Image (cartoon, helix red, strand yellow):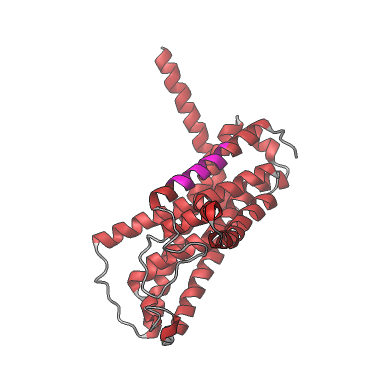
Amino acid sequence: MTNTISVAKSGTLFSGLGRMIGAEFLKLRKRSITRVLVFILAGIISLVNLLLLAISKVDLPAGNGPGMGNMSTLLGLSSAVPFTLSLIASFGVVLAIILAASSMGSEYNWKTIRTAIISSESRFKFLTAKLISISAMILMGMVIGVVVGIIMSLITNAIGGYTFDFSFLTGSYVWQQFLQFWRTFYTIIPFALLGFMMSIVGRSAMPGISTGIGVVFLESIITTFMRLASGWIAKVPDYLLNANVQAITALNELPRGFGRMGVGTTGDTAPSVTHAYITLGIYALAFLVLAYYLFRKRDITG
């Protein structure tokens, strides 16, 4: 009898959470900002590919560095997916921050937070449903971005008169891009959670958006100067977010002459991949725990 009751309670828990996830996902899908963010991502990927087409015929001077000759290799079909994922890791992370922060912060801005909590049975369920729906939407956005990147690569190759060579499309290639897709998602999550957490702290979307985007851009600038210092200061960037993101995105195989998307890390100073995974995981866990703790302890106003 006890086991039957436990199973029933467990079923009710997951059933209720499932309905809440569906409701939160529907809210995200119906919101205009979600569509705007997807259009922005698709626009950035399309624009960058068209710019590459414009310079693909240009022979850069040898003094620009090794491998900076004809840029047509950047338009190769084999580069479409890794190139798009690099763009997503650099620019898509900003859109993910906006999505995560606005999803939570809008509940405060619209004065719907009390009603949402009451109908959700518990704050834990409410926050969990929010996070799962946000993660699913980010994944969908990444898939859309990759599809747009592949389509734009086909278009630019056709316009540029380049050969359609699909010999690169092997099982190993597909597997590597599958891994890189999830690596990119892994690098986005800490920033999205930071924006999400700060929207709870500030009871609004703006603190989450401004803090998350500020960290993305300002940390890169600050750590560049830290690298120039000596002693322990030069090692500090290894324990911050951007340097570890760059260590993981560097696994993306791109043509010669293509610099990494992002700044602040060079091949000689980048932390190890294992170090990067652990550091980003610790940050993500810390932001997640703090979000749950603060949301549970603080008064719900609005």
- Out of 223 and 186, give the one closest to the viewer: 223
Within the image, what quadrant is residue 221 found in? bottom right
For the N terminus, the image quarter is top left
Report if residue 22 is visible in the image.
Answer: no
Within the image, what quadrant is residue 259 found in? bottom left
> How far across and down, in percent of the image, does residue 39 sit?
55, 65
The residue sitting at the front extreme is 231
Q: Is residue 236 magenta?
A: no
Residue positioned 42% across, 48% down in the render: 275
The residue sitting at the top extreme is 1
Within the image, what quadrant is residue 203 found in? top right
Q: Which residues are magenta?
A: 278-289
Give the answer, above or below, for where 89 lies relative to 194: below
Give the answer, above or below, for where 223 lies relative to 129: below
In this image, 262 relative to 151: left or right? right
Report if residue 302 is visible in the image.
Answer: yes
For the C terminus, the image quarter is top right
- Out of 269 and 49, give the one closest to the viewer: 269
The residue sitting at the right extreme is 302
> How far across and down, in percent of the image, does residue 253 sit?
35, 65
> How far across and down, in percent of the image, does residue 206 sit?
69, 52
Q: Is residue 279 magenta?
A: yes
Residue positioned 25% across, 60% down in the render: 172
- Out of 292 and 19, give the one closest to the viewer: 292
Give the answer, above or below, for where 257 lies relative to 276: below
**What predominant SS class does the magenta segment belong to?**
helix
> How far across and down, in percent of the image, does residue 108 sit?
70, 44
